[in-house]
Amino acid sequence: MMYGYLHEVCQQQHLDRTHRLKRSLIHLEVKQQCTNTSGGYNTGRMAEAPAKCVPCEGGAIEAMTGEAVQSALSALPWWTLESGAGDRLSIVRAFQAKNFVEAMAFLNRVAQVAEAEGHHPDIHLTSYREVKIELYTHSVGGVTEDDLILARRIDTLPVVYSKSQRQALEELEQSRAQS
């Protein structure tokens, strides 16, 4: 009888250690920064972490103009400016992940970063691997510096793209290098 109980306790301790190790590896993966596109991974071009988001406090932050956002997007090549309901501006990054699991893994990494920043994007997953991240500051109804900061942070996260998406990104990078 005692052996069975001890065996269960030892097994549970092993499972706890395994869970902690897996959790540590997930956190390590999120922190990794890689700048190549080989194997479908691409985590952006950020050499250093961007500034941290600041909380919105009753009118302390104003929405940026469309021209200011467009100018800032020159440093964020994977993001586009879109106009939403009531002329609300937002910045959007959309792509096709390799599969459902890779899309969800990316979205979970985005969720961790967003929660740490206290600034949350609208996240869309359609057709099982079509990912769309939409950023705007809900309290002011437009794009603020916090959205640009979060976009830069999201661009540092690893992504496993679909083959066609990876090819399109490589062609885009080549055309940018030539100009």
Image: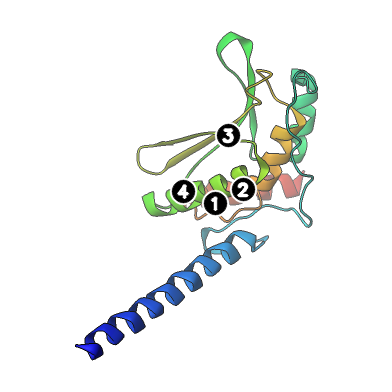
- Residue indicated by mark 1: 109
- Residue indicated by mark 2: 113
Q: Residue furthest bottom?
A: 3
Tell me the distance, in whole angstroms, between the alpha carbons under discs 4 and 1: 23 Å
Give the residue type at disc 1.
Answer: Arg
Q: In what element is the residue under mark 2?
A: helix
Q: Is there a contact, CB below 8 Å, between mark 2 and mark 1?
A: yes
Instruction: Please tell me which of labels 3 and 1 falls first in the chain.
Output: 1
> Is residue 77 visible to the viewer in this orientation of the structure?
no
The answer to whether 77 appears left or right of 167 in the picture is right
Whether residue 135 is situated above or below residue 23 in the rendered picture: above
Instruction: Please tell me which of labels 4 and 1 falls first in the chain.
Output: 1
Q: Position of residue 109 (x, y in %)?
A: 54, 51
Q: Nearer the viewer, mark 4 or mark 3?
A: 3
Tell me the distance, in whole angstroms, between the alpha carbons under discs 3 and 1: 12 Å
Task: Locate residue 84: give its quadrant.
Answer: top right
> What residue lies at 68% left-to-right and 45% top-to-bottom?
175
The answer to whether 40 appears left or right of 79 in the picture is left
The answer to whether 160 appears left or right of 48 in the picture is left
Q: Residues within 10 Å of mark 3 (few under 14, many from 20)?
A: many
> What residue lies at 64% left-to-right and 64% top-to-bottom?
32
> Is residue 164 visible to the viewer in this orientation of the structure?
yes
Tell me the distance, in whole angstroms, between the alpha carbons under discs 4 and 2: 27 Å
- Residue indicated by mark 3: 121
Q: Which mark is residue 164?
A: 4
Give the residue type at disc 3.
Answer: Pro
Q: Residues within 10 Å of mark 4 (few under 14, many from 20)?
A: few
Q: Position of residue 8 (x, y in %)?
A: 28, 80
> What residue lies at 69% left-to-right and 18% top-to-bottom?
140
Q: Residues within 10 Å of mark 1 (few under 14, many from 20)?
A: many
The foreground one among 1 and 138 is 1
